[in-house]
Image (cartoon, rainbow, N blue to C red):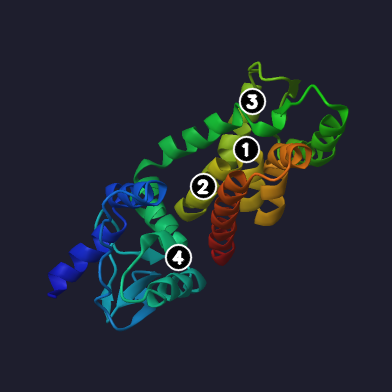
Amino acid sequence: MTDDNNDETTAAIFDLARNRALDEQVAHPGREKRKLPKRFYRKAEAGPHEGGFAILLDGRIVRTPSKQPLAVPVPALAEALAAEWDAQQDEIDPRSMRLTKLANTAIDLVAPRRDQVIAEIVNFAGTDLLCYRAEAPDALVERQTALWDPLLGWAAEQGVSFTVTSGLMHVPQPQGSLDAYGRTVAALDPFRIAGLHNAVTLTGSAILGLAVALGRLTPEEAFDIAHLDEHWQMEISGRDEEEEARLAARRAELLETGRFIALLG
């Protein structure tokens, strides 16, 4: 394979359309399988690149889907990305490379449209999970209060005070609080914003996502707090293997998101 073809391959491996097709294959195993790209390199490593650290395959820089150098700001994260590439066997499976996907997101999607991504995260804050409480039973209400109120208190210390309601009727949040939340996010670099966006999406809560990004909660703690209702339902109704599998996949992704953020230092 030529060097140019190597660049094209590394850029295409994480193409969104390709990943959607792979996900469809998992969801519908009877469909025709799409072949994963073959491993074409012997060695994956991290190396200095323009003030940061790039991922190198046999000495050549890996490219993102937008064909930008896959380079990150700290060596610890670069080494972890290189380890993901080195762990691939005969085929390269992007679904097993969550850290690389987040780095690609930071470089290709967050950096060039930073303000839009921040606005998307702030929009989550306007309908935050922690602000919508059950009306009954009392035991569930008490559990939500015990686990969610301390996080709202922590957010208030950051200048972000949210209104809490019972039921699902939308309640607008104070614009000053949303602005304060947005300023906190805007102070982060594109890589941390990418991690935060993923954490917010996985938990359904801008507050929980920020708590993970700023080290207030571990990813494990944030996951359990975010999925309190699902765990409660399974306690009442019994085990649901399909739901357990869905939650396990989301938990694994959140843990890797937290690891990505932690590696940034």
Measured in 3D between alpha carbons, the distance from the residue under mark 4 to the one under mark 1, in whole angstroms, is: 27 Å
Check disc 2 and report the residue beneath it: 198
Percent position of residue 263, x then y: 55, 66
Q: Residue at x 66, y 16 (%)?
A: 169
Q: Residues within 10 Å of mark 2 (few under 14, many from 20)?
A: many
Query: Is disc 4 in contact with disc 1, using a CB cutoff of under 8 Å?
Result: no
Q: Is residue 202 left or right of residue 137?
A: left
Q: Residues within 10 Å of mark 1 (few under 14, many from 20)?
A: many
Answer whether residue 142 is visible to the viewer in this image: yes
Going from the N terminus, do you reach mark 4 or mark 1 first? 4
Dot 2 amino acid type:
Asn
Q: Residue at x 85, y 39 (%)?
A: 146
Answer whether residue 218 is visible to the viewer in this image: no
Is 83 situated above or below 197?
below
Percent position of residue 116, x then y: 41, 35
Dot 4 amino acid type:
Pro
Quick one: SS at disc 2? helix
Which of the two marks, 2 or 4, is nearer to us in this view? 2
Quick one: SS at disc 1? loop
Measured in 3D between alpha carbons, the distance from the residue under mark 3 to the one under mark 1, in whole angstroms, is: 18 Å
Is 3 situated above or below 8?
below
Percent position of residue 115, x then y: 43, 37
Check disc 3 and report the residue beneath it: 176
Dot 3 amino acid type:
Gly
* Picture quarter with the C terminus: bottom right
Is 58 situated above or below 101?
below
Going from the N terminus, do you reach mark 3 or mark 1 first? 3
Which disc, if any, is residue 73? 4
